[in-house]
Image (cartoon, rainbow, N blue to C red):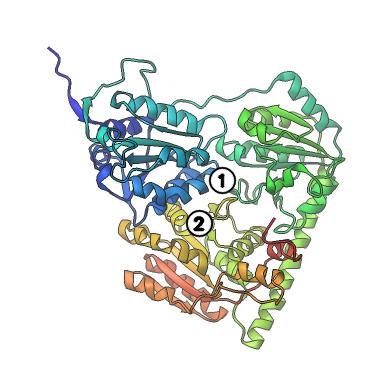
């Protein structure tokens, strides 16, 4: 006689996630989640306990962006409310994070149960899939469904709510495994293959083009097609641009890569895109960053082709002249077989980029000389450049904030042109959610322990998520935090000064906060830098310390090109 072993619902959940190959899980341990945590412990699945549920969500997001494999954020009912901002950030970057709520009892649902909230409804607009599990025998099934939703088509976060009475109840350990699929391990993601006739139409436009450009986006990254993107641009000598607010997919080793498709952050993209007669947007959305495909971003006489790996993405791109449903890699393979090159067109973009780098290099040299002569604080662009100069190739850079983010974007392109080859870059997505920096830097260091992870963060951004630094100390995962400290929400102050009738700013200033002392109190390395000459030594000592470190740098507020360009009219209330 076979005796069925009974285990709790939380253990079934843990085993189902283990079967999928989950390697990174994050939580703020709570009573509602204890059976799942016991299951994680029995399955020997690593879990990082965080000081706040939003941090747990950002850590799961950071690990997912780097590995391109779902990570788990496990929280209780009230913790779910704290994790919603992280869900928003993951949604904006289509990061397939698995959010799991140990929710209120199903037995008394709708009667005011302990910590009862409608987590499924709250998560629905921020995820691809949000569902409550109402039968313990179906836990493994719903994990399988959620994983499939997160990773297929246009990826994105998902949410599972497991009521506490199901979490604690006992079931046969093989509950629900008598139905297909019997194998619920991770499987290869289905890919869309291009319709041959439609593909020929696109390639015919390419062959006829005189000035084509490629703009690459999320779909390429999540499908792992960045190497094929670089190969296509290099072989065809076709300029490649990167969608703003997304992981930089190509480095300087690809000479066809130009930078961001952002007229303010990377000025040479404007003439390239305006002069192009064909724009190939691969894995992108025609959203606000692309001005929905309209002039003055893409000219009306320019042919616009959108290639996407799922119908979900194509729904965003109804304005394209031609749409192609295709896995980005499959399309890029076909594109590479086009027997034509655009050497002169690419050379023009390369020269424009060199001129842009020289212009900014000359500009910051003059600004820094004046700063030093007049005893002024550092320029934030100079800070960003000096930080990258102190890093080694293959180190990881994270930046977070308003103007801090924008200046570091510019510095990254300049430093790359000077030869710096970073291992990777992370930053807030297109919602510009402040406070992700520490979590993302911790994720980068956790996955790349032999590399240095450096975060350059605005003071406002650090105040939004700085408590997450405790996780670095708790887990002994040291990162370097450089704070661009200008004493306030400078990006917002500058917009107000251009918007308000009196030319002043309001409710955006901070006191003089000794961030470095906070790190010292927690057991880390810390230094205060007030002059540029002090910075190189401070960075060297911080890296050599082997500790989580803070360099609190007093910088002056300087308006970035994107803020200046988008706040120069009084009828504009914010960045458009």
Above or below for 452 versus 161: below
Q: Is residue 310 something one can see in this rendering?
A: no
Choose mark 1 or mark 2, whichever is in front. Answer: 1
How many marks are shown on the rendered structure?
A: 2
The spot of residue 76 in percent (x, y) is 32, 45
The spot of residue 359 in percent (x, y) is 76, 67
Front-lying residue, 281 or 76: 76
Question: Which residue is pictured at 49% across the width and 62% down the height?
Answer: 455
Q: Residue furthest top?
A: 1
The spot of residue 295 in percent (x, y) is 81, 47
Q: Which mark is residue 92?
A: 1
Q: Residues within 10 Å of mark 1 (few under 14, many from 20)?
A: many
The spot of residue 251 in percent (x, y) is 62, 50
Question: In the visual, does 425 lie left or right of 516?
Answer: right
- Residue to which mark 2 is pinned: 395
Q: Residues within 10 Å of mark 2 (few under 14, many from 20)?
A: many
Which quadrant would residue 153 be assigned to in this image?
A: top right
Q: Residue furthest bottom?
A: 374
The alpha-carbon separation of the residues under discs 1 and 2 comes to 25 Å
- Quadrant of the image for the C terminus? bottom right
Q: Secondary structure at mark 2?
A: loop
């Amino acid at each position: 006689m076979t005796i069925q072993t009974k285990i709790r619902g939380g253990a079934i959940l843990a085993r189902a996630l283990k079967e999928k190959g989950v390697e990174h899980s994050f939580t703020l341990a709570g009573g509602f989640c204890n059976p799942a945590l016991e299951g994680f412990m029995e399955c020997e699945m690593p879990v990082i306990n965080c000081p706040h549920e939003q941090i747990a969500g950002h850590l799961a997001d950071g690990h997912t962006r780097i590995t391109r494999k779902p990570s788990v954020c496990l929280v209780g009912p009230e913790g779910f409310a704290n994790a919603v901002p992280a869900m928003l950030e993951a949604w904006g970057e289509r990061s397939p994070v698995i959010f799991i709520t140990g929710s209120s009892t199903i037995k008394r649902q709708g009667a005011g149960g302990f910590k009862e909230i409608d987590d499924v409804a709250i998560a629905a607009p921020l995820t691809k899939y949000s569902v409550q599990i109402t039968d313990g025998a179906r836990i493994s099934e719903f994990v399988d469904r959620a994983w499939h939703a997160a990773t297929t088509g246009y990826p994105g976060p998902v949410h599972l709510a497991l009521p506490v009475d199901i979490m604690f109840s006992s079931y046969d350990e093989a509950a629900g495994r008598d139905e297909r699929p019997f194998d619920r391990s991770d499987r290869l993601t289905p890919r869309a293959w291009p319709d041959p006739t439609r593909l020929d139409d696109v390639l015919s436009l390419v062959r006829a083009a005189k000035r084509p450009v490629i703009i690459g986006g999320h779909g390429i990254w999540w499908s792992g097609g960045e190497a094929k993107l670089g190969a296509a641009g290099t072989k065809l000598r076709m300029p490649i641009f990167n969608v703003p607010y997304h992981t930089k997919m190509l480095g300087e080793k690809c000479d066809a890569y130009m930078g961001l498709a952002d007229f303010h952050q990377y000025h040479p993209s404007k003439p390239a895109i305006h002069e192009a007669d064909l724009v190939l947007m691969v894995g992108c959305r025609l959203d606000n960053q692309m001005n929905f495909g309209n002039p003055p971003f893409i000219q009306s006489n320019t042919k616009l082709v959108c290639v996407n790996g799922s119908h979900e993405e194509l729904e965003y791109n109804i304005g394209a002249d031609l749409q192609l449903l295709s896995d980005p890699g499959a399309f890029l393979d076909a594109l590479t077989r086009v027997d034509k090159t655009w050497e002169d067109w690419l050379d023009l973009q390369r020269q424009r980029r060199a001129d842009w780098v020289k212009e900014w290099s000359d500009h910051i040299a003059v600004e820094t000389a004046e700063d030093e002569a007049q005893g002024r604080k550092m320029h934030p662009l100079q800070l960003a450049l000096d930080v990258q100069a102190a890093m080694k190739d293959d180190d990881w850079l994270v930046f977070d904030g308003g103007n801090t983010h924008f200046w570091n974007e510019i510095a990254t392109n300049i430093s790359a042109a000077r030869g710096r080859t970073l291992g990777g870059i992370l930053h807030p997505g297109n919602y510009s959610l402040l406070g992700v920096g520490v979590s993302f830097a911790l994720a980068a260091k956790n996955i790349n322990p032999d590399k240095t992870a450096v975060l350059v963060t605005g003071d406002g951004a650090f105040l939004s998520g700085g408590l997450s630094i405790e996780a670095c100390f708790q887990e002994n995962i040291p990162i370097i935090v450089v704070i661009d400290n200008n004493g306030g929400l400078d990006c917002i102050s500058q917009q107000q000064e251009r918007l308000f009738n009196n030319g002043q700013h309001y409710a955006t200033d901070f006191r003089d906060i000794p961030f470095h002392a906070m790190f010292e109190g927690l057991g880390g390395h810390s230094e205060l830098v007030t002059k540029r000459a002090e910075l190189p030594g401070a960075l060297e000592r911080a890296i050599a310390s082997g500790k989580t470190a803070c360099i609190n740098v007093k910088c002056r507020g300087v308006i970035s090109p994107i803020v200046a360009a988008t706040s120069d009219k009084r009828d504009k209330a914010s960045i458009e």
